[in-house]
């Protein structure tokens, strides 16, 4: 009688960042059984060298355990186009123009499904498969970090638009003619709710109020959103006011998203979201105040259920699992 | 040998308005072969009397031709909830609270599919089935009339949200703290781009500029958006400026919708949309100017391909056809 072999099905989740690329081996349960980091930056524009080393890294991680059966590869990347499997003009990557990431990686792994999307869409997929959105078919995931990213799930499906680029809520306007954004326009919500948006609001309030604050010792270039958070935790009035005001602005935008998509919940993830109820409480209050009456008291604003450091890898893994769950 | 009988399959499209209810018998091709109007208003809150007369009207229209085979009934109504088949707290209807329109109508027509949605969603369904959106799987229909309605099709599906109430873009904010809206809030896009919004902008510009204008002879309560349109056609500078400014504001909002949903096109319908390029040209220019670079030169802003007076009936008919096309 032969030995009963039970292969453990896994997918690879890849988080492509401007500095590093993180690779994780993920069980269907969402458990990460192995992970590694390689540089993105050191390859410069040499995409082929990067992909060759990425292939080697994936193969070595998967072969560490004979029982692992590779079922798919999911990739989350800035400006990732889920429809085309490409990365297009990502400002913090050195690959020029349109990079056919999926097509090239498929030549190295020809027999398994490979899917790519932007990091915020991946976070939404991770949230619904492994996080706090399990069982939700209509929700929006909001990532508050360097920028403001969003992933929209409606009717159980990721909304990617006609070209794979839906879900850039960070670049919708909250105050026409407001703060200058990295995208070249003015008033994007990202200029208020990203990490640097929090810092800008701290200085705006220092300009406005005479309250004494720990934050007055920082320069504009050295203050981080974490400094504002730490000050708020220490009871600094102005720092707390920064989160109150930020929540007010975010709530205004969430009310608009509700009127557009009518999701059942928002899940907030990312570095700035670590502020928790300091940010989420005023956000909920402002959203409710700004909701059209048919939507009132229906929509939740909740923290992510994903472990912070694993959001990107789990999201990328969930993306390919959702295409081919076995 | 028996005679070959060819039944003509039809659906009923119903447009429920505060004053009247319009009923049309629609062939699968989109041709309206019969239509009639009954009062909504005269029944007051007596919904059962209204439904009984509506049933009689439908039956008499369908029986006018022995060859007609009734395949379904579609209803477009203000505050229509597509998920529940209900009309909820519609401000211009006299039925209080939640009216279970579909459920009651099903008791009168037990063997055919009956679907209901709000008028703007119905317009989107009509546009994709019979109008200018044929072949489009990602677009947004914008209805500019008494209010600003919207219907969102993404990935070939009507986006209705977790509760059937998605697509109220008219009540997303364009200028926080701006004009007072009928919904009780301030700055909704509807206060700028509806028929009354056009009139408000005309007076705003008369306040601002010293240009002589035909419009200075109207009172605030008597001027209509058609008066502004007629003045613009006659070359009135201020009236033309009203449409230029309105297009600028609409374009700003459309750019936000693109960043959220990435549709391939917008289709603009309704009374105010009859202004045509007077409104749509500045709308396109403003949208392009305000688009994030990845979306530029991709998204069309087009007039509806539906005959104005038939939009509501064709939309309601398309709604039920899309559920059961035979």
Image (cartoon, coloured by chain):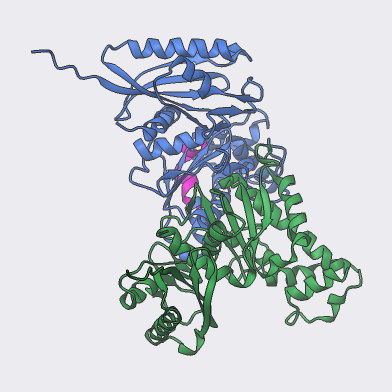
Chain colours: A green, B blue
Is residue B251 part of the magenta span, yes or no? no
Which quarter shows the C terminus of chain B?
Answer: top left
In which quarter of the view is residue B189 placed? top right
In which quarter of the view is residue A149 placed? bottom right
> In this rendering, does residue A274 appear at all?
yes
**Where residue B253 sits in the image (x, y, percent)?**
57, 51
> In this rendering, does residue A187 appear at all?
no
**Where residue A165 sits in the image (x, y, percent)?**
47, 61
Q: Residue at x 76, y 67 (%)?
A: A201
**In the image shown, does B159 or B133 lie closer to the viewer?**
B159
Q: Residue at x 79, y 65 (%)?
A: A242
Q: Which residues are magenta?
A: B271-282
The secondary structure that dominates the magenta segment is helix
Q: Please say if A277 is above or below B239.
A: below
**Where residue B87 sits in the image (x, y, percent)?**
58, 27
Which quarter shows the N terminus of chain B?
Answer: top left
**In the image shown, does A241 or B127 lie closer to the viewer?**
A241
Is residue B273 part of the magenta span, yes or no? yes
**In the image shown, does A300 or B155 lie closer to the viewer?**
A300
> How many numbered marks appear?
0
**Where residue B44 sits in the image (x, y, percent)?**
63, 14
- The reply, left or right, for residue B30 in relation to residue B83 is left
């Amino acid at each position: 009688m032969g030995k009963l072999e039970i292969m453990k099905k896994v997918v690879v989740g890849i988080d492509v960042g401007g500095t590093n690329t993180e690779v994780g081996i993920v069980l269907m349960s969402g458990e990460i059984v192995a992970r590694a980091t390689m540089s993105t930056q050191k390859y410069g524009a040499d995409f082929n060298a990067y992909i060759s080393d990425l292939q080697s890294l994936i193969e070595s991680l998967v072969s560490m355990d004979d029982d692992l059966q590779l079922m798919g590869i999911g990739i989350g990347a800035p400006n990732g186009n889920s429809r085309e499997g490409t990365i297009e003009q990502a400002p913090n990557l050195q690959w020029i123009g349109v990079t056919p990431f999926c097509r090239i990686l498929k030549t190295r792994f020809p027999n398994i499904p490979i899917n790519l999307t932007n990091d915020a869409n991946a976070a939404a997929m991770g949230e619904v498969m492994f996080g706090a959105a399990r069982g939700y078919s209509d929700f929006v995931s909001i990532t508050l970090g360097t920028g403001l990213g969003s992933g929209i799930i409606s009717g159980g499906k990721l909304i990617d638009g006609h070209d794979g680029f839906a879900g850039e809520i960070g670049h919708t306007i909250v105050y026409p003619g407001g703060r200058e954004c990295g995208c070249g326009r003015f008033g994007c919500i990202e200029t208020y709710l990203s990490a640097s948006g929090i810092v800008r609001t701290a200085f705006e309030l220092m300009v406005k109020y005479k309250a004494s604050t720990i934050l007055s010792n920082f320069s504009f270039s050295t203050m981080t959103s974490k400094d504002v958070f730490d000050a708020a935790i220490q009871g600094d009035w102005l720092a707390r006011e920064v989160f109150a005001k930020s929540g007010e602005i975010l709530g205004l935008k969430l009310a608009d998203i509700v009127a557009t998509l009518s999701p059942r919940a928002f899940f907030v993830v990312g570095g700035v979201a670590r502020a928790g109820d300091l940010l989420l409480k005023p956000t909920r209050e402002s959203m409710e105040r700004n909701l059209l009456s048919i939507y009132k008291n229906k929509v939740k604003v909740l923290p992510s259920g994903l472990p912070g450091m694993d959001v990107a890898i789990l999201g990328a893994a969930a993306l390919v699992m959702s295409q081919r769950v076995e």
